[in-house]
Image (cartoon, rainbow, N blue to C red):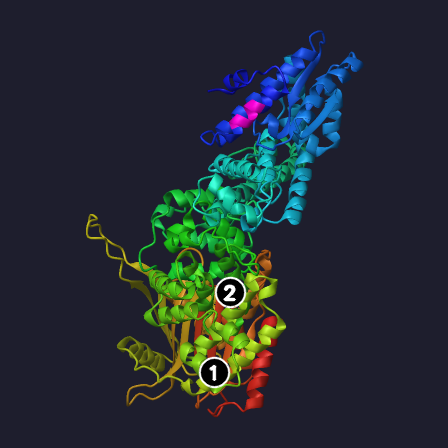
Amino acid sequence: MTSTDVDKQADDSGPSGYAAARLRLLTEGARSGPPRRTELSELTDDWLSGLFGAAAERLRGVSLVAVGGYGRGELSPRSDLDLLLLHDGGDTKAVAALADRIWYPVWDLGLALDHSVRTPAEARRTAGEDLKVQLGLLDARHIAGDLGLTTGLRTAVLADWRNQAPKRLPELRELCAERAERQGELQYLLEPDLKEARGGLRDATALRAVAASWLADAPREGLDDARRRLLDVRDALHLATGRATDRLALQEQDQVAAELGLLDADTLLRQVYEAARVISYASDVTWREVGRVLRSRAVRPRLRKLARERSDFLRRAVVGDGRALGGGKPVTERSPLAEGVVEQDGEVVLARAARPERDPVLPLRAAAAAAQAGLPLSLHAVRRLAATARPLPTPWPAEAREQLVTLLGSGQPTVPVWEALEAEDLITRLLPDWERVRCRPQRNAVHIWTVDRHLIETAVRAAEFTRRVSRPDLLLVAALLHDIGKGWPGDHSVAGEIIAKDVAARIGFDHADVTVLATLVRHHLLLVETATRRDLEDPATVRSVAEAVGTQSTLELLHALTEADALATGPAAWSSWRGSLVADLVRRVSAVLAGDLLDEPAAAAPTAEQERLAIEAIATGSPVLSLRAQTEPPAQDEPDEPAEPAEPEPLGVELLIAVPDQPGVLPAVAGVLALHRLTVRTAELRALELPEGVEGSVLLLDWRVAAEYGSLPQAARLRADLVRALDGSLDIAGRLAERDAAYPRRRGVVAPPPRVTVAPAASRLATVIEVRAQDAPGLLFRIGQALEDAAVRVRSAHASTLGANAVDAFYVTTPTGSPLPAQEAEAVARKLEEMLRG
């Protein structure tokens, strides 16, 4: 039955007929969603057309126009009627009388009415002064009267909008930002405003306005469905409350869920959050594109002026892409960020040579590079990765795990990059367990985020604490997984422990690390709950925590995770009082665990290759080295899949260097590698025991390196530069400084400051100095040089890069081979930290 049929049955000669037809339409549960909104609009159109026709039989040059939501045909049960009575400026008294004959019946029915009476010129002038009026007129729709008058206004308003778009769109963007600041983000609020909050119906309307400007368009996938879902919820809210409200209050959510046939209020909120997330992401992408287009338009007149001033010869000269300087678009600079990833026009895009179908790590590498640079991932890049990227093998290769850690450790820029991956379902492909927590609400006044966003926020907070722990990679992954069990019934810590073990093994951690991660997830609430709810003077309390934690390093990680988790929960979850209680508990537990500290592990016996290099170094009196690719076995295919030749996954290149023992070896080797743009992933330096009968002392460096871009340098070139570095003829510091000065600094994450500490009682044979800092080219060279300047002897070094973090331990002694006195050790650490901060 159409709305017209319903209206006729109700005798549409007056308001009572419309009211009865309207009531029947709204109470028929079978007709809901878009069909009901359409029929309600048609029913209202017919009624208003009747009112207009009865009063305007002899009046010409007048039309009745629906604008705003009514113009879009989106009438909810308690929506306002947005109406414009348009006239050509003729008989104004007759127009005023006509308006009364339309407005009063609407008011008599108790319907909210937003009305105006204007000529086309007045409407355009008002739109030029009031952005909200202009947005409403963009959706103008003819109801009755002079169709030509309505069509002329609509055409003129659209033309005005397109002509004024460079000025009005920034105003619209600012309006959206101010509204978001007031109302918050729809996708995280427990009592959201479906219309005004960021990601709500107002933003969806703003995206339509941007599209109407022809300057940019929103990504369409899922946008119409998201808008429809929010409108459906608003319809149900109006029916459940009987009021014209857009705020989804807690006490009404169960009733609204029942009205929509959903299981419960949590299911309702999850659908609302998912819709809001689609609209929010579309808004981010669209406004970024608007900014790019407007910047391009601002530059174009200057380029045209420059082209006119050039000679005919230069205008015919051809630039890189084959276009003349006097015409076409200027070449956009592309700056490399990582293998297969470049920056272009303020976004991170894939390099032209990138092959996602052959490079399963590329999505994570691109995301990590974007987050580290503080830049957004382009929509095109994310969609190409989602469409073509090959799935990662199980377990993940080492590079994939490192790139995930780098992404998580990038601080606040991690959030928009993660959201871009989420928008194309790349996160659930990488971590299938994520689906359970995606958009999951938390009905707790302390929590300000959904479960999934809370996990990312915890990683953001944990990135600030990476200098406090010896394994920042485990801290960041534990932050990502600590509440992963909230998608399952029962105690989320118990469920999360099981899931964390599976995820950690899948992404390639070894058994020991998997155990630590599972412990952190299982006990992520242990410290704060014990500190605030138990008597810390009771030895049994401290012993129970020590038994649960097990080791000093796990306690260190749990302490940092506890604080990151609380800070990411909300303002009420952490305070200086809570922090002091937790710190007191950690101090007591640490004292219990102090007996677990181990001495420096004994050096492994040298391999035949290491012995060969050492003997050659002694014989020649100069450094010798070898480069050897490292691989791990390929993942096994499933039995039912066709057998294909599997390629081993690259782990990097092992660089073995043997050098006659002499001062300056560590900074020399690290500096040469930095000059050749080699990234040091792990590094060990130790004195080598030579076979009996061979005189001399040799230092052995066993490092794993990778090229930042392109291929590795030849071993002969590395050796030649190392010889020059050791004899002082190669100015490494100067060369590195020149290279840094040649490249402008990128804006990116603000890393936490470096931290240098003396590890207490870590070894009886040497003083252990630990350095935790942001990884950067030449970092190991600077540290080695500073230790040389401090006149201490590096007995051994254990450097590793975990994501974007360098975690290095240096076993140092006095020139005579004894541990440093306590005060001297602290002084060395302090000077080293000052150097790194400066």
Q: Report the residue that reaches farthest toward the right.
A: 93
Relative side of 53 to 480, left or right:
right
Residue 735 screen position, x and y as percent: 54, 65
Residue 727 screen position, x and y as percent: 48, 77
Q: Can you identify the residue that label 1 sits on?
A: 542
Q: Can you identify the residue that label 2 sits on?
A: 777
- Front disc: 2 or 1: 1
The three-letter code of the residue at mark 2 reads: Pro
Characterize the magenta stretch by its predominant secondary structure: helix
The three-letter code of the residue at mark 1 reads: Val
Q: Which residues are magenta?
A: 20-25
> How would you rate the neighbour count of disc 1 (Cα within 10 Å): few for under 14, some for 14-19, many for 20 or more?
many
Relative side of 286 to 551, left or right:
right
Residue 381, placed above or below residue 784: above
Specify the quadrant of the image occupied by residue 661.
Answer: bottom left
| Residue 727 inside the magenta-drawn segment | no
Q: Earlier in the sequence, mark 2 or mark 1?
A: 1
Residue 543 screen position, x and y as percent: 44, 83
Label 1's element?
helix
Residue 200, placed above or below residue 311: below
Residue 61 badge: none
Residue under the image location 66 percent in, 36 percent down: 169
